[in-house]
Amino acid sequence: MSNEFIDETLKDAEAKMEKTAEILQSDLLTVRTGRASPALIERLKVEYYGTAMPLNQLATISAPEPRLLVVRPWDASAAAAIEKAILKSDLGLTPNNDGKIIRLPIPRLTEERRQELVKLVNRRIEEAKVALRNTRRDSLEELRELEKEKIISEDEFYQARDKLQELTDKYNERVEQIGQAKEREILEV
C-alpha cells in the first residue's frame, strides 16, 4: 500500500519536470536565430481592442524565404497594432507594413547579438533548472511527510529520494541538451 504514495509523488514530479522541459523548448523557439521561423513571433502579445492577444490568433504567419517572415492579418485594422507589437518586442526586427501584409526581413545576426542571445538562452536554461530543483524540493518534502506520518518506512524514503534524484538528473541533462541545441543554432553562421 505504501508504494502507491511513493509512485504518485514520483509520477507527479516527473510530470512537472516534463512540463518544465516543454516550456523551455517552446520558450527557446521565440529566441531569434539567423533563420526565419514563424515560432519567433507567433506568441508575441498584440494589444487589439483593449486585449493582449497572441499574434497567431490575429494573423497567418509564414516564412516564404529563409530570411523573411510574412504576417497576413485576418482583419486589416489589426496591422498597425501588430506592427507596434513587433517594434516593441526585443527581437530587433523592422516590419514593412503595406496595410494588408507585414513583411519582416530577418537580418543576419552580428557576432555581438549572437553572444547576447546565447546569454539569454543560458538564463532561460538556468530558470528551467531552478524550476526542476523546486519540483525536487517539493517532492522531497512530500516524501519526508509520508515518512514522518509512518506511511512509508525510512528505507522506502531513501529509495524514493534516490529515484527522485535520478529523475532530476535526467531532466537537468535534457534541459542542457535543449539549450545546447539552441546555442548551436544561434552560433551557426
Image (cartoon, rainbow, N blue to C red):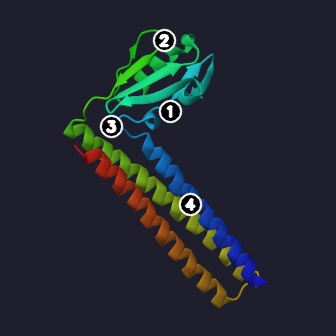
Q: Which residue is mark 2?
A: 100
Q: Relative to 10, does residue 125 appear above or below in the rendering?
A: above
> Which residue is located at x 50 percent, y 20 percent?
72
Q: CA distance from mark 2 to mark 4?
A: 40 Å
Amino acid type of the residue tagged 1 in the rendering = Glu
Q: Which label lies toward us, 3 or 4?
A: 3
Is residue 145 among the parts visible in the rendering?
Answer: no
Numbered marks: total: 4
Closer to the camera, 122 or 145?
122
Closer to the camera, 104 or 30?
104
Q: CA distance from mark 3 to mark 4?
A: 27 Å
Nearer the N terminus, badge 2 or badge 4? 4
Count residues near mark 1 (Cα–Cα under 10 Å), then give few for <14, some for 14-19, many for 20+.
many
Q: Which residue is mark 4?
A: 18
Q: Which residue is mark 1?
A: 42
Quadrant of the frame with the N terminus: bottom right
Closer to the camera, 176 or 119?
176
Residue 137 percent coordinates (x, y): 57, 68
Say whether residue 137 is left or right of residue 100. right
Circles 2 and 4, Cβ within 8 Å, touching? The answer is no
Q: Which residue is mark 3?
A: 35
Nearer the N terminus, badge 3 or badge 1? 3
Say whether residue 5 is left or right of residue 180. right
Nearer the N terminus, badge 1 or badge 4? 4
